[in-house]
Image: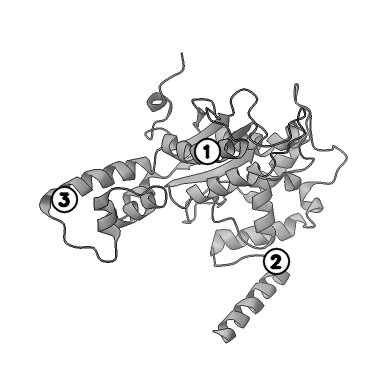
Amino acid sequence: MPLPRKRQISLSDPPYYHCISRCVRRAFLCGEDKLTGKSYEHRRQWVEDRLLFLTTVFAIDVCAYAVMSNHTHVVLYVNSGKAKHWTDKEVAQRWHMLHKGTLLSQKFTSEQATELSEAEHMTLQSTLSVYRSRLIDISWFMRELNEPIARQANQEDNCTGHFWEGRFKSQALLDEHALAACMVYVDLNPIRAKMATTPESSHHTSIKRRIHDFKKGYQPSTLMPFVGNSMQPKPAGLKFDLVDYLKLVDLSGRSFVPNKRGAIDMSGSPILQRLGLDEETWQDIFLTFETNFSVAAGQSGTLKEYKRKRRQKSSLG
């Protein structure tokens, strides 16, 4: 018998979780149905867009993700401390990004908000307490991810009924070793399934998004950032070096795993060379994040182009 969700997920434990959602029977999340020839590839973008949107609403960060043909992987971090610092109005506004809320919560956030009576205030506080707890709840996060996708897919398929299995699977990641191993596993999923040959060509994955954005000089705002492992004060984030993580993914992907179809070509160049960057350049970029976390960081050419565009915008303004 599966454990109740409240026993699987506890905020008193390390707040990292690996969650997997699978489609029922032969329902297609993405990919191509070989029997009918119909492609569902466009649905990958539905999932990725919805997932990254939810990071702007919930106090839950995404560490890694991969959108597969009939299931999704996400590695999540519950940032309960962040939610505690939200004002009541911010909690209501965030919830309204997902649902209409109540008449009282709408009244509270409206520009023409009027004074609430004592009874209304007590009712509103109770409601906002519920909203605040939901915004750090992984079950609610996964519900808000999966249900809109199911409705959209059923509408496109002109059918009704279950699209996802009733429960998503969750695994608590109890230490940094487990977290790193799980993130690598998730980022390598398309390669193991022979859907991609390298991390940088693995569409709709966190590793591809990180590589794409970091080459431009920044880390994705919708993913939990890598902040390194030094003891200096810095923003919250993954306590690994990004360059080390990329090399770990690349190295792990080269080994063949029983019952898995794909692997990175052993004869291929190391990932930094494939990306046209040497390790010294990557370390220079990463040190920018470790020392000052400025508004932009990147290679000299990228930074010059960024500054040029900023000057153009300023002159136009």
Secondary structure at badge 2 equals loop
Q: CA distance from mark 1 to mark 2?
A: 43 Å
Q: How is the image coloured?
A: one colour
Q: Is residue 15 visible?
A: no
Name the residue carrying label 1: 151
Give amino acid for label 2.
Gln
**Disc 2: CA contacts within 10 A as few (<14), some (14-19) or many (>=20):** some
The amino acid on which the numbered mark 1 sits, given as a three-letter code, is Arg
Provide the residue designation for mark 3. Answer: 120
Q: Which residue is mark 2?
A: 299
Residue 13 in picture, x, y percent from top left: 41, 32
Q: With 162 as the anchor, is 69 left or right in this view?
A: right
Q: Nearer the viewer, mark 1 or mark 2?
A: 1
Query: Quick one: 308 or 40, which is closer to the camera?
Result: 40
Whether label 1 touches label 2, CB < 8 Å: no
Horizontal and vertical percent position of residue 64: 59, 42
Which numbered disc, 1 or 3, marks the residue closer to the eye? 1
**In the displayed structure, would residue 120 be above or below residue 254?**
below
Q: Residue at x 77, y 43 (%)?
A: 198
Could you tell me residue 243's position as x and y percent? 67, 50
Q: Which quadrant would residue 178 be assigned to in this image?
A: top right
Quadrant, the C terminus: bottom right
